[in-house]
Image (tube, grey):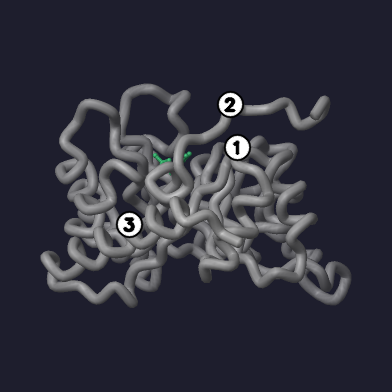
């Protein structure tokens, strides 16, 4: 059974999302909430499943891979929201419905289906949806492509078989007004629609700033602690 605290936090966030959507004149049906369960145990994912959640976000391959294997058949859509190492790209793609953090050409190449592999040779390779992550800071370690490099990367995704482009993803920089950050992402998103007309989705908004993200047009919220409670300290999965 799900803990009462968990269901009440979920209800609070759902009400907050509904309020923000109403203020923005938007429908909640146009907003997907992904519950980010990184560092959380599988038991918590199961409780959230009981509460009707089907979209889960993870940011570390090793952990995501174990959870996806353990919960295979539960009807979960896994969203990978963390930085993807090139050599793990194919593995991440295997269990992910959506990869939110495509941020460089080498990763696009690693994720894409080589054209010669499209016919029956690799029947298990299905297209994977993705977002291009934009870095709104000057720190490359934050992940995401810099704004000047965004358009060429979008073109590269569009030209890569096996990848479906949903739109842009971003994390609001600490210390900046999140609403202005998200407005910039929305503006970049509409510019990108000039070259990718169907890439109209925006993955933005976390526990602290989802209302601002909804006001600026977010379609995919990535919410962790406001729903799950605090994250436990990360464990080393190899030794636990
Ligand atoms: C952890 C994480 C989230 C969720 O963060 P909370 O503050 O717990 O809501 C969202 N997006 C990304 C990329 C994350 O790594």
Up the image or down, 59 lies above or below 201; here it is above
C-alpha distance separating marks 2 and 1: 7 Å
* Residue 230, position as x, y percentages in the image: 46, 36
Q: Are marks 2 and 1 in contact (CB under 8 Å)?
A: yes
Residue displayed at 38% across by 53% down: 9
Residue displayed at 52% across by 70% down: 52
Residue 181 appears in view? yes
Residue at disc 2, CB closer than 8 Å to ligand 1: no
Residue at disc 3, CB closer than 8 Å to ligand 1: no
169 lies left or right of 71: left
Dot 2 or dot 3, earlier in sequence: 3
Q: Are marks 3 and 1 in contact (CB under 8 Å)?
A: no
Residue displayed at 48% across by 54% down: 35
Q: Residue furthest right?
A: 121
Ligand 1 is located in which of the four quadrants? top left
Residue corresponding to mark 1: 39
Report which quarter residue 186 is drawn in. Answer: bottom left
Disc 2 secondary structure class: loop
Up the image or down, 25 lies above or below 64; here it is below
Residue 233: which disc?
Answer: 2
107 lies left or right of 171: right
Residue corresponding to mark 3: 13
Disc 3 secondary structure class: helix
């Amino acid at each position: 059974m799900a803990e009462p605290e968990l269901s009440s936090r979920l209800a609070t966030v759902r009400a907050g999302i509904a309020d923000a959507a109403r203020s923005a004149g938007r429908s909640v049906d146009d907003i997907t909430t992904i519950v980010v369960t990184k560092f959380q145990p599988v038991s918590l994912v199961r409780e959230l499943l009981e509460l009707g959640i089907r979209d889960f976000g993870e940011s570390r391959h090793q952990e995501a891979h174990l959870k996806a294997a353990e919960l295979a058949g539960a009807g979960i859509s896994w969203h990978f929201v963390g930085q993807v190492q090139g050599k793990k790209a194919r593995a991440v793609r295997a269990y992910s419905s959506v990869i939110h953090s495509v941020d460089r050409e080498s990763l696009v190449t690693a994720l894409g289906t080589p054209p010669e592999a499209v016919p029956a040779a690799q029947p298990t390779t299905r297209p994977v949806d993705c977002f291009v992550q934009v870095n709104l800071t000057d720190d490359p370690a934050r992940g995401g492509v810099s704004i000047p490099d965004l358009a060429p990367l979008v073109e590269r995704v569009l030209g890569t078989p096996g990848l479906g482009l949903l739109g842009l993803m971003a994390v609001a920089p600490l210390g900046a007004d999140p609403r202005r950050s998200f407005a910039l992402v929305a503006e970049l998103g509409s510019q990108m629609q000039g070259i990718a007309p169907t890439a109209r989705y925006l993955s933005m908004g976390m526990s602290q700033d989802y209302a601002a993200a909804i006001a600026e047009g977010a379609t995919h919220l990535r919410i962790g602690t406001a729903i799950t409670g605090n994250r436990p300290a990360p464990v080393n999965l190899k030794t636990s």
